[in-house]
Amino acid sequence: MEYFLAQVGVVVFAVSGVLSAARQRLDIFSIVVVGLLTAVGGGTLRDVILNVPVFWLLDLTSFWVALGASFATFVGIRFILKLPLRLLSYLDAMGVALFAVQAIDKTLLFGYPAPVAVVMGLITSIAGGIIRDVVTHRPTLLLSRELYATPILLGGVLYVVLLRLMPSPLSRGIAMGLIFGLRAIAIRWQIFLPLRLTLKIDLDQDEC
Amino acid sequence: MEYFLAQVGVVVFAVSGVLSAARQRLDIFSIVVVGLLTAVGGGTLRDVILNVPVFWLLDLTSFWVALGASFATFVGIRFILKLPLRLLSYLDAMGVALFAVQAIDKTLLFGYPAPVAVVMGLITSIAGGIIRDVVTHRPTLLLSRELYATPILLGGVLYVVLLRLMPSPLSRGIAMGLIFGLRAIAIRWQIFLPLRLTLKIDLDQDEC
Amino acid sequence: MEYFLAQVGVVVFAVSGVLSAARQRLDIFSIVVVGLLTAVGGGTLRDVILNVPVFWLLDLTSFWVALGASFATFVGIRFILKLPLRLLSYLDAMGVALFAVQAIDKTLLFGYPAPVAVVMGLITSIAGGIIRDVVTHRPTLLLSRELYATPILLGGVLYVVLLRLMPSPLSRGIAMGLIFGLRAIAIRWQIFLPLRLTLKIDLDQDEC
């Protein structure tokens, strides 16, 4: 079940990569490369930083799923575009919640302390999207006002706390529920953090 | 011979990094840094993902060649700019073909399956250019309509297939010929994939 | 003392990350993520390339300091913005000087030759800032005309040369003085390298 969910996450990330790349007229292979990068980029960075074997080198399933999903998105783009974009956002939120929790488990398994695990959860679930935005030369998701990093951070902290209080599956369910729930609220009602918790400064001097 | 060709690849990548950086008025050291990143970035990423020692830490030759080429490009820029840009593109295509095949060999040598090797060939030959484009704040080569990733992917797949059918040197020659040939055709006649194999979507909502 | 200085470097980098992110109206968590990336990104890349355990996985101090500094900057932004920006630049120059020298020590300690150490000094001290600029979608510091990479390169070379001639603490002092001094001169009088040592080319054809 979880393995299946993880592949759903990979599929959704690949689709979002393809959609981002296809804003330019690109050929199928370039588009597939962006889809792949988006889908496996976050986990790759996590494993490289943890200095453990990169996950898709050990088990090619994620790789083939990402590849297939990218091709399928290319071929079936008309069908995909008929879906409400919001549906994709919800699937993305599901993938993000799952990736975060799995990365935290993996990091704890290697003996690292909880704060490191939370950071790895964050890295794994957002790095793919950041790489996607960087290679397609768009403002990265970190610059979006919509809640993106925030639910992952809060859910990650909650997860490592709950793990000390209750059995793992229950903790996972609650943490993933929080991440998905906050993202879903942000997507559905476009809710942001209160203005007091945001910051914008205007610097007089141009630094560029 | 092959060692020599690899250094030609390094030189060409360094030159392309310098040319990209020099679109802004930068000082010599900043420019050299971009040249270096472009020349060794792809191979560095490959080795980091494979979790093997980074190549230029073991043998500084590539490093010095990249450094020297970057300086030489800075000093001899007038001469370089008199060369037809197309010549540089052909040399780049040669470097790309060689880098891809060498990366595939290295990956197979470490016992990874063929699909991983093909991906590593792609990463090694395009990551340097992507890093160059990112640090010089330009649209990355993945966003170019010109065939770039495509010949490498096709040539890489052909290479790992041929390796099972015929001796290694012959396979290499054919695969490198395919990569170089497709790139050369793309450069010479600006040929793209047929429109059917490209994709461009217009999303109504601005997401940025 | 040195440990303390290193944390000052982390603080300054975190602050610069927060200031860069806050040019857009972002929420506190997104901003903190950028602060963190800026503060620990350079050292992380260094350790990944050297294939040694990433420093903040072993000792969480830098991590907490970066986190705390990012939060504090968010909360105390009015106070920070009253400081002369130049003060921040000087502190940044201090952090850069220290990071470079420490990275060189670490690299030499692992048995790598001096040129590798100089490159690692450069990577460690500028990669965090480059990551900051990339994720906030701004031109990277490599594209600034102001002296940034240059003092680090010159100071790094001087340091590895001095290490063969005199005791380590003295070498460090001189090298850090050179890096800081050159940066300070660049900040104070906005001095660049002589025009002869810069390069700008105009290419007729648009490549994008």
Image: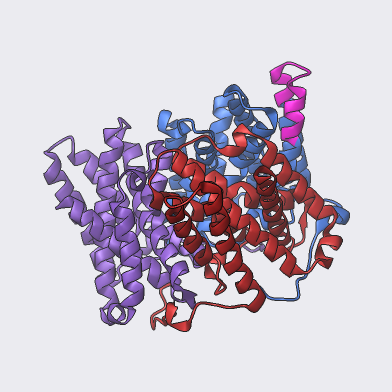
Chain colours: A red, B blue, C purple
- Left or right side of C19 for B9: right
> Whole-percent x and y of residue B114?
69, 29
**Location of the C terminus of chain A (image quadrant):** bottom left
Q: Residue at x 86, y 62 (%)?
A: A78
Q: Is residue A104 left or right of residue B164?
A: left
In the foreground, B81 or A74: A74
Task: Name the residue: 46% across, 44% down.
Answer: A107
Residue C129 to residue C74: above or below: above
Residue B133 visible here? no
Examine the rendering and report whether any part of residue A145 can be seen.
Answer: yes
Q: Which SS does the magenta portion mostly show?
A: helix
What residue span does the magenta drawing correspond to?
A: B155-172
Query: Is residue C197 toward the left or the right of residue C85 in the image?
Result: right
Q: Is residue B166 left or right of residue C125?
A: right
Quadrant of res B103? top right
Residue sitting farthest toward the front: A166
Q: Position of residue C55 (x, y in %)?
A: 33, 45
